[in-house]
Amino acid sequence: MIRVLLAEDQAMIREALAALLSFEDDIEVVAQVGRGDQVAAAARDAKPDVALLDIEMPGMDGLTAAAVLRRVCPDIKVVILTTFGRPGYLRRAMESGASGFIVKDSPADKLARTIRDVLDGQRVIDPELAAAALAEGASPLTPREHDVLAAAAANEGATIAELAAELFLSEGTVRNYLSSCIQKTGARNRTEAQRIAHERGWL
């Protein structure tokens, strides 16, 4: 049996996925969690062969959880499951050690096939999405610019002073980083920069 850990914050979707996979003779869902920061502990307890991770979860996003799993449970194969087939997300998923990337509107049998294929040592990626990721290239944001823009996105309406205090940076430094983010995304302001970076999977 292929042992699967399922991480998805929406209970209805999580239960539906578990039910779909239960119809497969060779797949067993051995753990379910609704938060990204619960993934590593659940993996250590349940010892799954494959972890199926949603990207957008509270506590920790699925891409970060995948990177944590690669460190603490390197033998577990990771498949990223997402609503958004964004090239930037795909690139970050591969960088975090994921073996598969599948969008939620894929046929149900593709999910089971993907689980089997990654356990078999294959990397499963939609060809069109892979081509788009290569064409778009990597995120132009530096790690620090990413952190500042992510903090601004998480604290909508926060002032420069509030962001600086949270990030332990000077106000001038935060202002410079945000200005650079705006320039690199081609946005008119920081809100638009956040939207563009999010849409492209850079945040």
Image: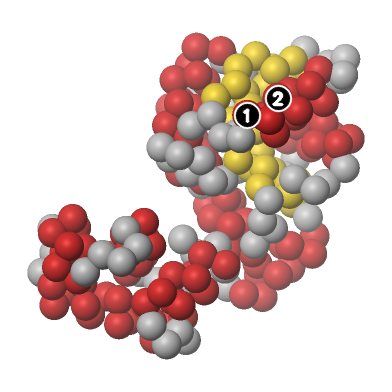
The amino acid type found where label 1 is placed reads Ala
Q: Label 1, label 2: how many angstroms apart (C-alpha)?
A: 6 Å
Decide if residue 199 is on the left or right side of residue 2: left
User: Does the CB distance between marks 1 and 2 fall below 8 Å?
Assistant: yes
Q: Quadrant of residue 51?
A: top right
Residue 162: give x, y in percent of width and height: 17, 62
Callout 2: 10 Å neighbours few (<14), some, many (20+)? some
Please name the residue that numbered disc 1 is placed on. Answer: 11
How packed mark 1 is, by other alpha carbons closer than 10 Å (few <14, some 14-19, many 20 or more), is few
x and y, in percent, of residue 117 in the image: 79, 35
Q: Position of residue 3 (x, y in %)?
A: 69, 17
Residue shown at 54% from the left, 29% from the top = 34
Task: Please tell me which residue is depicted at 79% across the width and 64% down the height of the picture.
Answer: 128
Query: Taking 175 as reference, is 2 left or right?
Result: right
Residue marked by disc 2:
15
Amino acid at the residue labelled 2: Glu
Q: Classify mark 1: helix, strand or loop.
A: helix
